[in-house]
Amino acid sequence: MPKFLQWVTERIPPIMQYPDCCVVAIEYRGQVYGVPEALGLPRQMVQGLRIEGELAGRLCIAYTEEHDFLDEESALLGDIARRVNGYLENQRLLSQTQARVRREQTLREITARVRNSTDPDVVMRTLVQELGGVLDRPTFVRLGSAEELSEPKAPQSRGDQQGAGG
């Protein structure tokens, strides 16, 4: 996406009325592409960039010299901004789709591992380990009867954990 935004900023000046003094910047999610100076010049046109209806950045076309913008240039800015918005929205949707595909693939892999075992302990351990991997969190399995699991487990002393004579 950064290459595309930079590419856009480079293509606009040649099509403006005064290309030699035209600078363009795209500010998107805290990053600036193109010529940052464009964002602070007094002679500028600005169009917001939106993702899911939320303002995510802006496209700024500016002149470094005293020139007025033509109505056609203003219309051009609106058209370019719509196209950039479309591209950004498509990239967002693509990213969401790829994440969904990865989740579904992970679920299929977990399901296949669980199906290969008939031992409930192994099934539970596999599910918890895989869930921990997906969530990137440590996970644990504590197996026992309902009575054993409902009673608080007494903490072991260090000596008990190391064994006798340890």
Image (cartoon, helix red, strand yellow):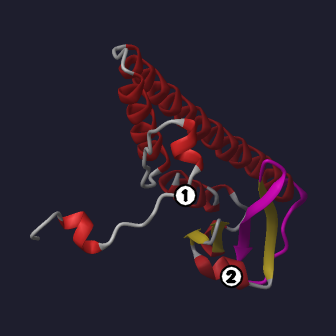
Return the residue found at the far right. Answer: 71
Question: Does 158 sit left or right of 93 as displayed?
Answer: left
Pair 2/1: label in front: 1
As drawn, 111 above or below 71 = above
Residue at (42, 23) in percent of width and height? 120
Q: Position of residue 155 (x, y in %)?
A: 42, 67
154 or 22: nearer the viewer: 154
For the residues marked 2 and 1, what is the alpha-carbon distance in whole angstroms?
73 Å
Residue at (40, 14) in percent of width and height? 115
Q: Position of residue 47 (x, y in %)?
A: 81, 62
Residue holding disc 2: 64
Q: Position of residue 58 (x, y in %)?
A: 74, 65
Q: Which residues are magenta?
A: 51-72
As drawn, 55 above or below 93 = below
Residue at (46, 38) in percent of width and height? 144
91 or 74: nearer the viewer: 91
Q: Are there few (<14), some (14-19), or many (20+) residues within 10 Å of tag 2?
A: some
144 or 90: nearer the viewer: 144
Residue holding disc 1: 152
Q: Helix or strand or loop: what does disc 2 sit on?
A: loop
Q: What is the number of the mark on residue 103?
A: none
Q: Looking at the image, is mark 2 or mark 1 earlier in the sequence? A: 2
Please identify the quarter of the rendering in which residue 109 is found: top left
